[in-house]
Amino acid sequence: MENAATENPSSTPARLRRLNIGPRLTACFLIIVVLMGAVDFIAVWQFKRIEVSAHRFYQVDQKSLAVMRAHVDLMEFREALITLANAQDERGFAVEAASQRDHVVQDVRRAEETLKSFPYQDSNVALTLEAVGRSLPLQADVLVQLANAGDWQGVRLRLANQVRTLVGLTSQLVHDVDQEVTHERTQALASTERARDQLALVLSVTAAFTLLMAIVFGWYATRSITGPLATLDKGAKALGSGDFQHQIEVQGEDELARLGTAFNYAARQVRELYDELKSNEARFRALIEYSSDLILILDSEAIVRYVSPSSLRVAGRNQEELLGKCLFDFLASEDISKMRDTLGGTHTESRPAIEVGFRRPDGSMAVIEVLANNLLDEPAVAGVVVNARDITERKSAEEQLNKLHQLEADLAYMNRVSVMGELAASLAHEIKQPIAAAATNAKTGLRWLQREPSDMGEAGEALSRIVKDVSRAADIIDRTRSLYRRGIPQREMVNLNELIREMTALLRDAANRHSISMRADLDESLPTIAADRVQMQQVLMNLMLNGIEAMKDTSGELTVRSGKSDDGQILLSVSDLGVGLPAEKIDQVFDAFFTTKTQGTGMGLSISRRIIESHGGRLWACANTGRGATFQFTIPTEVSAFSTSAGGDVHSPT
Ligand code: ADP
């Protein structure tokens, strides 16, 4: 195939290449057979030429024979009549003369016929024979008459002259024909020899040519099969040795060319598959090698059969240390049964990751998170695939974070407690009122009972009022106690307007002490929201107490408003006419521990902001155009985010 690349596509071999092998071989054999037929035809043609010469040779011989026979007959005729004339046998002479005459005339006629059959006529010979044929009967008749008349002398004279002349003529004829025959024979011989030489030459040339052509076509037919076969063989060997780039140069359109095309296609497919396999393998290898996790494959006895290169990084042990060892040998003894359970599962059931202690070479324990997939039944893997992740740092970070949360919760709680301290007087006043009312009602009731007769109706009413007063006091205590309670944040449906009213009632006494009036401007159409009641109370309390604090030297009005923001969220604001936000430090008022007060903690606003943000809202402050400051926050009506800290959200302080 490769050699054929240099052939002219329109040449015969190239055209033959388009044929299938069967027709191609048939064409080659046909060409050889046709050539052999041509050689046979030439040989026959040459034989024909020799045959023509031989025939001419035969004809000349026939001519010579016929003339010779006529001459011999004439001589015999003359000799026989001379003998009879000498014997003077009249009767015998007449019979013999007639018989011999007919014989001679017959032979002369035959000679004439023979001459006529020649393609060319020798008029001289024909005329001589005709003359002999015509005069012999006349001479014979004259001789018989002379013999009958007894003129034997005349007979002898005539035989000696006239008949002898005729013999002379035929003798001359024999001589001429002989000369001619000799000439013809020489020519025929020469022609035959020439034809024989030509035949030998033509036969040897054509035989040699046929042989050559047979060799050429035989060689070509063989080559056109063995060449592509060798190329295919070479390609198969290259493929076998992993050279998937190898492609066969395909020429022609025969079965081998189609085989070559199929081979190239198959090789390309194999190469593409191989490339894909290689890139997949490289990808998976990279995934495993550069994974921060440790990948292990264990057999059914938990013996490590494969370790990813990340083992040193994750487990502090190199691959050699782990390979062939039982995984349990490296685990904390209390975690072995847990690990055994995880390894024993099947890959179809999803098992949660477990955390186990993994012993490092220095004796310290790393905490690793393990996820196992039992693929022992998968013939390609035949092992348990273990994904291990070092979570030691994460665990300690979580612990730190938990501690921080606890700290934050404690701080928030402390904030509430400290705020409640400030409310103690206000609370005492608040509770005193229902208790004093209850005492008054109790006295009234007692009086109605001591009357004669007792007025049970009035006494019952007094008792009912006592129950109401005591319930009111219990409510106040409950609300207050909830602020002191350490507890898990709970989401419940909260009416913020109601909360504002409660807080206003709770803080009224504190406000009165500083001649501060309180006003609630509430939008009653506000929906209830899912929120943590205590945290919301804490925010309102912080903002309202800060407002009261800001106005304690100047008095003024504290306004609490509820309504809706432009984007449909609930908007609450607390405005005062106090000292205003600290100059050039407005941004810092929400920072933890920022305070401008001698007894301040600096945690109120920081905690409040994180509570609001944990409810998905936003808290900010701005200075009023006149006096004082306004703090406001938004809360979405659908609260989605929700923190878990008891005193606010658990993020680190801003
Ligand atoms: P604390 O009240 O213990 O100082 P906060 O976090 O509640 O802690 O407040 C931080 C600071 O913000 C206060 O010290 C004060 O300087 C400022 N601030 C808070 N509320 C107001 C207000 N209504 N008017 C003026 N300044 C305020």
Image: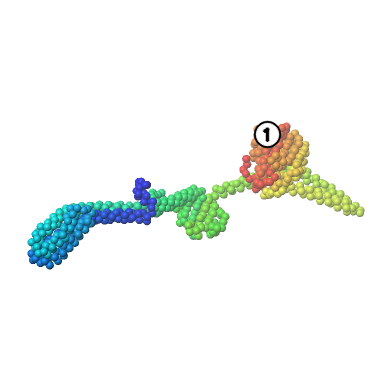
The response on whether ligand 1 sits within 8 Å of label 1 is yes
Quarter of the rendering containing residue 346: bottom right
Q: Secondary structure at mark 1?
A: loop
Can residue 591 be seen from the camera position used here?
yes
- The colour scheme of the drawn protein is rainbow
127 on left or right of 206:
left
- Residue 326 shows in this picture: no
Q: Choose between 275 and 293: the one closer to the eye.
A: 275
Q: Position of residue 447 (x, y in %)?
A: 88, 50
Q: Which image quarter has ligand 1?
A: top right
Query: Is 163 displayed left or right of 191 in the figure?
Result: left
Q: Where's residue 464, x and y in %?
A: 83, 51
Residue sitting at x 65%, y 34%: 585
The x, y position of residue 605, in whole percent, is 67, 40
Label 1: how many Cα within 10 Å (few below 14, some 14–19, many 20+): some
Which residue is disc 1 drawn over? 582
In-front residue for pair 274/197:
197
Furthest residue toward front: 149
Count of numbered labels shown in the rendering:
1
